[in-house]
Amino acid sequence: MNAPTIIEAPNTAAVIAALQARFGDRLSTSPAIREAHGRGEGLRDLAAPSAVVFAETTEDVAAVLALCHEARVPVIPFGTGTSLEGQLQALGGGISLDLGRMDKVLAINAPDMDCRVQAGVTREALNHAIRDQGLFFPLDPGANASLGGMAATRASGTNAVRYGTMREVTLGLTVVTPQGRIIRTGGRARKSSAGYDLTRLYIGSEGTLGVITELQLRLFGVPEVISAARVQFPDLASAVQTVMAVMACGIAVARIELLDALQMQACIAWSRLEGFAVAPTLFLEFHGSEAAVAEQIAMVEALAGEHGGSAFAFATTTEARSAMWRARHEAYHAARGLAPGKDSFTTDACVPISRLADCIAESHAEAQALGLVAPIVGHVGDGNFHMLVLFDPADPDERARADKLAASVSERAIRMGGTCTGEHGIGVHKLDALLLEHGAEAVAVMQAIKAALDPHGIMNPGKTVPSLPPLG
Amino acid sequence: MNAPTIIEAPNTAAVIAALQARFGDRLSTSPAIREAHGRGEGLRDLAAPSAVVFAETTEDVAAVLALCHEARVPVIPFGTGTSLEGQLQALGGGISLDLGRMDKVLAINAPDMDCRVQAGVTREALNHAIRDQGLFFPLDPGANASLGGMAATRASGTNAVRYGTMREVTLGLTVVTPQGRIIRTGGRARKSSAGYDLTRLYIGSEGTLGVITELQLRLFGVPEVISAARVQFPDLASAVQTVMAVMACGIAVARIELLDALQMQACIAWSRLEGFAVAPTLFLEFHGSEAAVAEQIAMVEALAGEHGGSAFAFATTTEARSAMWRARHEAYHAARGLAPGKDSFTTDACVPISRLADCIAESHAEAQALGLVAPIVGHVGDGNFHMLVLFDPADPDERARADKLAASVSERAIRMGGTCTGEHGIGVHKLDALLLEHGAEAVAVMQAIKAALDPHGIMNPGKTVPSLPPLG
């Protein structure tokens, strides 16, 4: 286990004592609980916080921040612990602020199709709460993440091609500033030109500017019909060209996911699939009226056919859809099954769709040249794809090759006009890539904002924005 | 004419001399040109800048800003001069930076459906440039505004209900900071989680944080079919309930515009319309495949019928659509025609759609109580509506009543969970409303960002964010 040496702030013990007085058994310094708060999903690297506070209200959060701001002790917000880029590592110790108990759906406004939730509500819990009103919250990053955490990392997932990312579906926030002040951003209007867009500034800031404690979110009507489809291709380029044609025709697919041949090989073995070849495959979902969905399926089938697609099939009942999508749903475990005992991490490049086939092909070739097993899954309607890079944690050379692949996938995406992260964030892993992507002058603007809003640097230090000399 | 006393910065004359040396006849101090840069569309209040510079490149902009930053002289970015909230007033004199000559479409990427333009390109010029590639840029705020100006005010318009606002369609920007540094924000990827969302921070900042010189914009495929429809209602509430039903059913209308009875009365007289009653009317537009559009029209007709709609009609050819929408297109001039010789300004409230009927009804009643003529047009799918408030500039009492109405429309929208501005911005007119809407603590965060990025306060001073004590 990699556990970096943590140098705690001098006032840490005093702050923990003061927090204990206020929070009692809602503060924990147990090693097991601290460790559970000091990494992310499937990550080996650990940097445990000095203590964990379980907040129940926005005022709890404000109290923690005011105290830590005064004492210059770091605070790391925590939702469900499913972040992937090291956002949770307590690099300088300090307080992990667990919002999991802030799990109340505060308001559901069916006529306006919006809701207000506490930050610890998970996307599945929200969908459970609104289902009987004919509404749903579409974003699906895979994990049953907290909505606060999803906003903090600007998450999205398979449905983003139709419904947008957290940036688009969030109307407003309640945020506690590093000083412990409570602000509300945005509102309930669908659009606004009133002042600086603080909502979008906090979305994607990964807990480095403040703590999101409530969210006002857009909801959507449950579609009349949901259908699924799958189609296979002789090569990756044909699959991606089909996606481009689908997007160019304005077909409002709800999901359009690519699995490469290696990932399909893994899925066929893991999920015991029948009727699939080991070939690049698109999985699609359609939402709409019966006529609209039927028209979309026919158009997609025709476009796929023009690009060499075969074995087109679609399904409409819930059971048949689930069966058809099983490969996609079990892709992560199937890929891990390619090399039992190995560790893995996930790349997150996102490029203009015209560069997607090249970006995937070059990355795939590089993985092979490096002797790495790295199957690919892509939210291809957005130009976003993930390589699950498998490596033996006991083999430093393989780990180094895996890291090299990850870095060059980021660089390749940036060179192609894209981004090093479509939906996972910067965390501690991609600080160099951020600089490469945006340049020193733009990063200096980010740093100036960080310095202005968090002058003592207590909020999730070492993440998201690299340290740079301040703006002159 | 209201011309406030302008106290220029001490170095203004020296800066103008230095700029003249660099820009020659691209700098003007002619009174006519200065006046044309010191107000906005249809606004009487004037605060002319000390000089106007016509920039042709991002480097020109950087040179102006570096000089003015050093000399502490204000800079006010200028596009087409169509802003409505006083954003262009040179309250402290200084340099109006006219970007109108930065009118090049730099790149059109048809496969990715995006483009890069200089900030002075207007939306109509962009659409002209991309039309033969089967693409269009949907946002339509009415005026043929520059795209840089539309980003700066977070503009939207009639198509936003389907295609989003400048917030959603902008992928990235080139911005010159107040210090004269050139940064690029965002990129060409459809989504990104890489660092703070500077793109969204500059969008809507009304030239107070820097100057937008280039934009990377999403484009859309020209729909296979465009149809228009109109339907009339016995009362406003029935019309709005129809809109709510349409939105709840997920019908992807491209436009859904409301004109109230007074506005329809004006339109019938001005545009010599036949076949319309003096009654609240919805005008709609549908984009999609032939089958999808036909289905949408049938659904909307049925929903309108359930809510008392009558005189439903639709049109598909370009000519028939134009004829049907003529009332909407000529609404402004028709409304002005209600009281020839009077001046007007426009309110811009946006509320959750469940409050829209109440907000309009209360505002309408208040206008009547105040003895004001104020017809209403609404982008009702977004909950946004405009009252065109007519007043006699020679009658201070009527002007005062008009201002009172404007202030209370903003307050009412905020009280109902909405915003004082859906798409026109804060400018100088709504600084009080901004404070009411977001609260002093959130405005203090905006002020801290302003102070961090523009420490000398040269960028469009007096706009968007009220002066407040800095964050402690």
Image (cartoon, coloured by chain):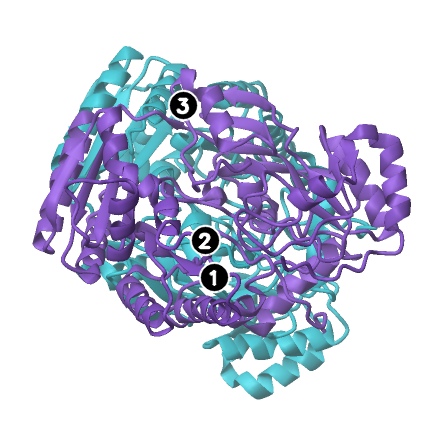
Chain colours: A purple, B cyan
Q: Chain of mark 2?
A: A
Residue B123: x percent and y percent? Answer: 35, 57
Residue B182: x percent and y percent? Answer: 55, 73
Element type at mark 1: loop
Element type at mark 2: loop
For marks 2 and 3, the one nearer the N-term is 3
Q: Which label number is shown at residue A135?
A: 3
Q: Which residue is mark 2?
A: A341
Residue that appears at 55% across and 58% down: A426
Q: Chain of mark 1?
A: A
For the residue pair B333 and A363, the one nearer the viewer reads as: A363
Residue A29 in view of the camera: yes
Residue that appears at 17% across and 59% down: A238
Residue that appears at 33% across and 61% down: A352
Callout 2 amino acid:
Gly
For the residue pair A211 and B311, the one nearer the viewer reads as: A211
The residue carrying pointer 1 sits among few (fewer than 14), some (14 to 19) or many (20 or more) residues within 10 Å by Cα, namely: some
Q: Which residue is mark 1?
A: A392
Asked if disc 1 and disc 2 are in contact, CB closer than 8 Å, the reply is yes
**Quarter residue B243 falls in:** top left
Q: Which label number is shown at residue B68?
A: none
**Marks 1 and 2, Cα distance to the nearest angstrom?**
8 Å
Residue B81 in view of the camera: no
**Quarter residue B89 falls in:** bottom right
Quadrant placement of the N terminus of chain A: bottom right
